[in-house]
Image (spheres, rainbow, N blue to C red):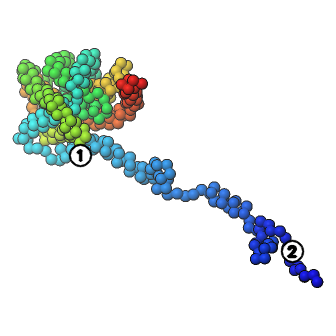
Amino acid sequence: MPMAVSTHHVSIKSSNAAPHSDGLELEDTRAPENTNSDVTKSNKQSTRPQHRTIEQLQRLDGKPVYTKRQKIAKNLIWLAKDQWFLIAMGIIILIASQVQVPSSQQPIKRTVVTYLSVSVIFFINGCTLSTRVLLENYKKWKVHAFVQLQCYLVTSAATFAIVSLCATNPSFMDPWLLIGFLFLGSAPTTMSSNVVMTRQAHGNTALTVVQSVIGNFLCPFLTPILLQMYLSCDAWYTKVLVSGDNYAEIYRRVFKQLGLSLFLPMALGQLVQHLFPAPTRKVFVDWKLIKLSSIALLSLVWQTFDQAFRSAAFASVKPSNIIFIVFINIALYAIWLGICFAAATVWLDKRDVIACCYCCPSKALSMVVPLSSVMYISVSPVDQSKLQIPAIIFQALQVAIGGGLTVVFRRWIRPFEHEEEMREGRQEDKDVRGIAGV
């Protein structure tokens, strides 16, 4: 008798069949899973943009991502670190305007700070500059002639032209201020700020040192001649002067300052560098004590303004004249710098151009003071202070503008430095291959 068969359909196992205990496999009547929809969902999830945090983005590309506020804060911090000198100079001038050394101590303070500060700057240069590099820069006689002609003839002629234009109204400008401008234009390059700024701008510091030495050595010979030539024009503002003949005192004071604050510290620095090369490099380069030269320059700025505020030099001049002096000084610096840069870029490399651009427009206040006090007699302390005001304001402006130009010059010379590094690297590789016999 045949066995009754269930009405359920029996078939061979498909891919979706479930195993049965009898060895037969029944078809799975459940709805199959929609695998295509799962794939589509996963694709949608993968293409959906994901919101990542700043930290996750940093981990992805290795570069930090800043918000707008963080970028502003970062730029301000960088500016404060890079231009700390200008910020410190502003604070020092503010302090000098409020608190001054007593008048009885001013001569001692001026002598100690001037000699000590300049000595520190040139001692550090002697410890960090190679003797070979200094001697090589002394041989650049064409550059010396170019810089000194700019410092003495071009700057003094441009200043005399501007003074002649400004002297048309005797009731506006004080005659001592106009004479002070002529002293400023005929003065040599400074011995301190241009050296510090050239180093910060990645220029040829050795060339700047050499130009400072030559320029200040020529000062007692050239500056009095230039002043006598410009002041013999018989203009109304020259009537207040009574000439002296004590030129021996000029030579004594100038060469004493050069010997004690420039030549002697420079020679001692060179000696220390040759006797102790490794410790010297560690102290001034690795420990960054080379920044002491910037601090010494700040002390010179403080000394200048402390004396000016103590002698009431600014109070004795009309505010309109002070404003006029500021604008004329900026114009003079811009004219001198523009002429120097345009002429130097034609035939000098970029490091030498930077050195010239700091030497030519800069002026030494330390030379204006002794010259003005020795060349002319019967000058009252108030008139003496007026005569020095253009140089005092110019010193602050040249340090401020020079500090700002360090950023510009560093960016300008960066491609040149990169090419130099690449060239030196290729030369080293060539030397190594030559030694190995490749």
User: Residue sitting at 9 percent across and 21 percent down?
Assistant: 251
Q: Is residue 156 visible?
A: no
Q: Is residue 58 left or right of residue 172?
A: right
Q: Is residue 23 left or right of residue 323?
A: right
Q: Position of residue 150 (x, y in %)?
A: 27, 20
Q: Secondary structure at mark 1?
A: helix
Which mark sits nearer the N-terminus, 1 or 2? 2
Around disc 2, counting alpha carbons within 10 Å, would you say few (fewer than 14), some (14 to 19), or many (20 or more)?
few
Number of residue marks: 2
Q: Which residue is mark 2?
A: 9
Closest to the observer: 418 or 200? 418
Q: Is residue 216 visible?
A: yes
Q: Secondary structure at mark 2?
A: loop
Q: Position of residue 85 (x, y in %)?
A: 26, 41
* Residue 256 versus residue 1 in the image, above or below: above
Q: Position of residue 275 (x, y in %)?
A: 15, 31
Amino acid found under the numbered disc labelled 1: Ile
Closest to the observer: 392 or 345? 345
Instruction: Say which mark, if any, is on residue 248.
Output: none
User: Residue sitting at 7 percent across and 27 percent down?
Assistant: 378
User: Residue sitting at 22 percent across and 32 percent down?
Assistant: 128
Q: Which residue is mark 1?
A: 91
Question: Which quadrant holds residue 39?
Answer: bottom right
Quadrant location of the C terminus in the rendered image = top left
Residue closest to the far front: 1
Around disc 1, counting alpha carbons within 10 Å, would you say few (fewer than 14), some (14 to 19), or many (20 or more)?
few
Residue closest to the far bottom: 1
* Residue 196 versus residue 62 in the image, above or below: above
Amino acid found under the numbered disc labelled 2: His
Alpha carbon separation for disc pair 1 and 2: 100 Å
